[in-house]
């Protein structure tokens, strides 16, 4: 379904790092990364912030959650291959990288500060995993009164049932839902002349991830 984006909207990509995208997911992680990359290109074109989060822990594991019921967390430590962001995202010094030590991208990080000091009122959210990092960030964003859009073809999970529960039960209560193409169309509709000029000069956005369209979520 179409989404309405605030003028000051940021893209937040959850945990598209090698240690997370290597997990066995319900839908190909490569497709999620490519959708995230397409979104990042267009957000930059419209001079809107691109934020990427990663999860990383100290080498001694002292900052890992250790409650009796805590689910096993991939032990991705600072300075290892698992913390490297996927190169397709083309992150650079103009983007914001947030390091977290748990599910929630807002807890114990400067994410809220970085967004609010830039006057951001809306968030477009994508990444892995739907029911863990994405849902935790979505709930926290809603509690902080951000207008929220979840990109339905740019999220996946290691558990298909949990993924469906987030998309069908939780997210509709706190966010608008839209596809990658719908988010890009909503952005471009606000500045069609600039979008047309940019697309003519650089068409890479439309080439990214085209193979995933069609049957990507046919089981939903």
Image (cartoon, grey):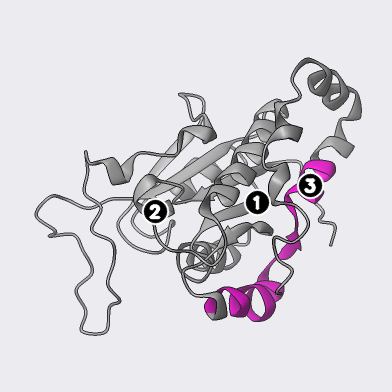
Residue 92 placed where, x, y %?
47, 25
Residue beneath disc 3: 181
Instruction: Residue 117: say if magenta.
Output: no
Q: Is residue 99 visible?
A: no
* Spatial CA span between label 1 and label 2: 23 Å
Instruction: Residue 178: say if magenta.
Output: yes
Task: Identify the residue shown where x is 46% and y is 32%.
Answer: 87
Residue 147 placed where, x, y %?
69, 58
Q: Which residues are magenta?
A: 162-186
Task: Identify the residue shown where x is 43% and y is 47%.
Answer: 53
Residue beneath disc 2: 22
Residue in front for this viewpoint, 104 or 213:
213
Reading the chain from its start, which is encountered first: label 2 or label 3?
2
Residue beneath disc 1: 124
* Spatial CA span between label 3 and label 1: 13 Å
Please state the total of marks drawn on the protein image. 3
Vertical order, 92 against 103 (above or below): above
Quarter of the view holding residue 188: top right
* Spatial CA span between label 2 and label 3: 25 Å
């Amino acid at each position: 379904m179409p989404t309405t984006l605030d003028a000051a909207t940021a893209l937040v990509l959850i945990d598209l790092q090698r240690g997370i995208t290597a997990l066995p997911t319900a839908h190909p992680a490569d497709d999620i990364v490519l959708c995230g990359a397409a979104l990042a290109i267009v957000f930059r074109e419209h001079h809107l912030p691109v934020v990427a989060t990663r999860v990383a822990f100290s080498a001694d594991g002292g900052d890992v959650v250790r409650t009796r019921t805590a689910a096993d967390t991939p032990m991705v430590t600072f300075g290892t291959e698992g913390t490297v962001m996927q190169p397709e995202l083309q992150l650079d010094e103009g983007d914001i990288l947030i390091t977290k030590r748990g599910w929630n991208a807002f807890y114990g990080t400067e994410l809220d500060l970085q967004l609010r000091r830039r006057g951001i009122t809306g968030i477009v959210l994508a990444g892995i995993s739907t029911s863990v990092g994405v849902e935790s960030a979505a709930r926290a964003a809603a509690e902080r009164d951000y207008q929220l859009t979840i990109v339905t073809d740019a999220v996946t999970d290691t558990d298909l049932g949990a993924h469906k529960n987030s998309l069908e039960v939780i997210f509709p209560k706190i966010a608008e839902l839209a596809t990658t193409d719908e988010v890009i169309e909503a952005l471009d509709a606000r500045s069609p002349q600039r979008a047309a000029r940019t697309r003519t000069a650089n068409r890479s956005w439309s080439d990214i991830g085209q193979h995933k369209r069609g049957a990507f979520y046919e089981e939903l």
